[in-house]
Image (cartoon, coloured by chain):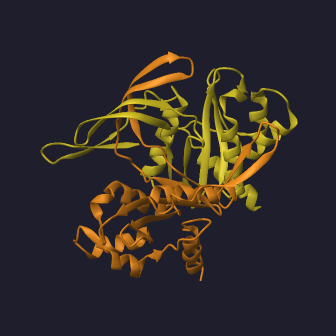
Chain colours: A orange, B yellow
Amino acid sequence: MVKKVNYPNGIKKTFKINTANRGMSLENDLNDTNNYYRNHDIAIIYKKPTPITINKVDYKARNDAVIKEAHFIVPSTTDYNGVYNGKYIDFEAKETRKNYFPLSNIHNHQIEHLRKIKKCGGIGFIIVKFSLSNEVYLLEIDKLDKFLDNSKRKSIPKEYFVNEGYLIKQGYNPYLDYLKIIDIIRSDENE
Amino acid sequence: MVKKVNYPNGIKKTFKINTANRGMSLENDLNDTNNYYRNHDIAIIYKKPTPITINKVDYKARNDAVIKEAHFIVPSTTDYNGVYNGKYIDFEAKETRKNYFPLSNIHNHQIEHLRKIKKCGGIGFIIVKFSLSNEVYLLEIDKLDKFLDNSKRKSIPKEYFVNEGYLIKQGYNPYLDYLKIIDIIRSDENE
């Protein structure tokens, strides 16, 4: 990712953005990756704003409204969506410090949302980072459902991600190239 | 659209939702329409939450955090996106009480966003409601760009929407069936 800075004398410089925070949080790494995709016209994928209900707004001045009371609400969808090669992409991203993924980390209606995305021809998945081993996996909604259909466990062991999901390799630019996995999935579908 | 109510004695009833507010605001009508699409597995399209930055949160109790100070931020994208027949859909919706559409109603970076959507194979457009005549038009990003390329005007006359856009017919269910226009556009593209 590249940042442009305009100097007062009209000289334009281009900087590489600091990569020191990479690997610190999955959200940062995905934002970094999505910025790269956007800046290179590869894909337009954003994290959605946090859903809230606003109760009280103080209109101090024109264009300067301050929200004085608001509440977080349970999201009805996933955090990330966008477009890649015309296809609709939709996913939820979670981190865990266990060597399994607790299903309490994802809401039932988010899983239901991903199923509906699949039904409407979109590509739905979850991205899970196992922080201790610094491994990031992509698991399609179908594979998540396969687990839920066949198990009463309240968590998915990491082995399931290893066997049924895809390890996202960590590179330089972009840092977490998860769309490479989408290419693999789509080429498998077309075979 | 249908609402399910669970009664204490286990009886489930299904109600049609009140349509009295229809035509009152474009946002309501689009939410109503998107609910219909979702409930019938036609498309999954949502309005995004309002983007804000949160400065102060009061953690009164577990699961009861109250946002005490937050600010609205300029959205970097459009308000609505989702999936229809596998295709990525993205649009901004605006109302005007004039017989023209003031370009100040839409941010430059939202127009830029729609261009990028198109570049990545998605379907980008604006929906504009002319409140006084109660007409709602869909205008593709290409046609919006064509206007901007050829005019220095700060507003788009309604005639441009009539000639270059599509009138969205108002029906019963769904109320504003804008995906019908997408079908027309896509079948034209494939001819």
Asked whether the viewer can see residue A132, the reply is yes
Q: Quadrant of the N terminus of chain B?
A: top left
Q: Which of A175 and B101 is in front in this view?
A: A175
Image spot of residue A61 (x, y percent): 53, 16
Q: In which quarter of the image is the C terminus of chain B?
A: bottom right
> Which of the 4 image quarters holds residue A108?
bottom left
Residue at (81, 44) in percent of width and height: A11
Q: Which residue lies furthest to the right in this view?
A: B150
Residue at (82, 40) in percent of width and height: A10
> Which of the 4 image quarters holds residue A96?
bottom left
Q: Vertical placement of B93 versus A155: above or below?
A: above
Residue at (59, 73) in percent of width and height: A183
A175 left or right, relative to A98: right
Asked whether the viewer can see residue B172, the reply is no
> Which of the 4 image quarters holds residue B188?
bottom right
Q: Which of B169 and A170 is in front in this view?
A: A170
Image spot of residue B170 (x, y percent): 57, 36
Image spot of residue A85 (x, y percent): 65, 64
What count of labels does the image hold?
0
Q: Vertical placement of B4 versus A150: above or below?
A: above
Image spot of residue A102 (x, y percent): 28, 65
Q: Which residue lies furthest to the front in this view?
A: A9
B64 left or right, relative to A26: left
Residue at (78, 33) in percent of width and height: B160
